[in-house]
Image (spheres, rainbow, N blue to C red):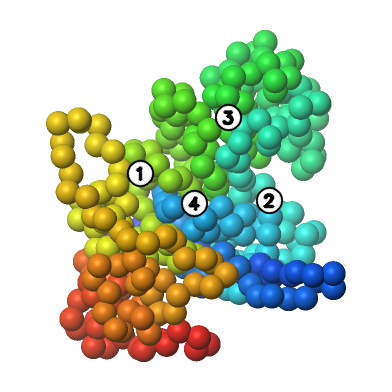
Amino acid sequence: MNSAQSDSAAARDVPLLAVESVAKRFPVRRGVFGALQGYVHAVDGVSFDLRPRETLGIVGESGCGKSTLARMIVRLIDPSEGAIRFGGEDITRLPAAEMRRFRRNIQFIFQDPYASLNPRLKAGDIVAEPLENFETANWQNRAERVQALFAKVRLGPDQVRKFPHEFSGGQRQRLGIARALALNPSVIVADEPVSALDVSVQAQIINLMMDLQAEFGLSYLFIAHDLAVVQHISHRVAVMYLGRIVEIANRSALFASPLHPYTEALLDAAPAPNPAIRRKKAIVAGEVPSPMHPPPGCHFHPRCPLAEERCRIEVPVLVEGRPGHFAACHVRAPAEARENLPKVVAGES
């Protein structure tokens, strides 16, 4: 391998986005004087990376911290702890003026395709707004860019002059995608972008996003609770439970042979497309604990059928059970890993 090939290979190995032990705690205050009652542990020490042209799917039950994590990555909210790096540069606590130069590289697609659009602006103005905010090109070039973006997301040129209420749900989400593409970002964070749409429209939007990824070399952080959608679009999948990532692996490995008991339960609960298939359901007892008072040790241990005494005390870390397949489970960790892992007791810093 020559030096140019070596440099190219090294560049491919550098994560475009790196999230390192990120946590978010929201204070809970009550009473006339706003006395602090505690904290909601929305995200608790999450780490992962996202590589060029990759789609990382993040799945989990409602309330597990997926949307909070997404908003921290684009700095709509600030993390309580940890670091977020884009292209190797720490953007975690950059002031607004310095963060602005990264905004064009990391864009967001919101869950609600109507609430995220200004009802007083025409569709063309909504898509042109990022170009105006970043003073990209003149008025005529912006108009041409808007027309080109409408064509990319398969909206007609006559729809530029319509208002959001004149669009269907799927068309509004196409409009949101066009707005996210306006500044030629390298990363798009999509927070449940198809959950509010009909199933047939979901397929259209997912296929559109995949086509755009292939054309523009985009990286997606795709957040959803629909396992079938995540399986279709993702290269790797991370599973979250009560603020933590409990498993992360390539799509095929995770869906074929999950390691964590919670992932197994999620997959067993998903409906099979073939009614003749009868799955053996992994019944998970109890309810999801309150994020204000998460259990010590492994957050899943009160509901886990495999829980041991160690699970109630020590916080599990992600361990590579198979090549490229990581799970945070004391029971399923390889024997040699269990012996060598540092003991992290709940509550220790």
The answer to whether residue 13 is visible is no
| Discs 1, 4 touching: Cβ within 8 Å | no
Q: Earlier in the sequence, mark 2 or mark 3?
A: 2
What residue does disc 3 label?
173
Cα–Cα gap, marks 2 and 1: 29 Å
Q: Position of residue 261 (x, y in %)?
A: 27, 63
Q: Element under label 2?
A: helix
Mark 4, residue position:
62
Residue 336 has which mark? none
Residue 227 badge = 1
In the picture shown, does residue 60 fall above or below 215? below
**Which numbered disc covers residue 103?**
2
Q: Is residue 79 above or below residue 339?
A: above
Q: Residue furthest top?
A: 158
- Give me the C-alpha separation between circle 1 and circle 4: 13 Å
Tag 1 secondary structure: helix
Which residue is depicted at the point 85% across and 69% down?
A: 32
Q: Which sits earlier in the primary sequence, circle 4 or circle 2?
A: 4
What is the C-alpha distance between the residues marked 3 and 4?
21 Å
User: What secondary structure is marked by label 3?
Assistant: helix
Can you say which quadrant of the picture contains the N terminus?
bottom left
Amino acid carrying mark 4 in the image = Ser
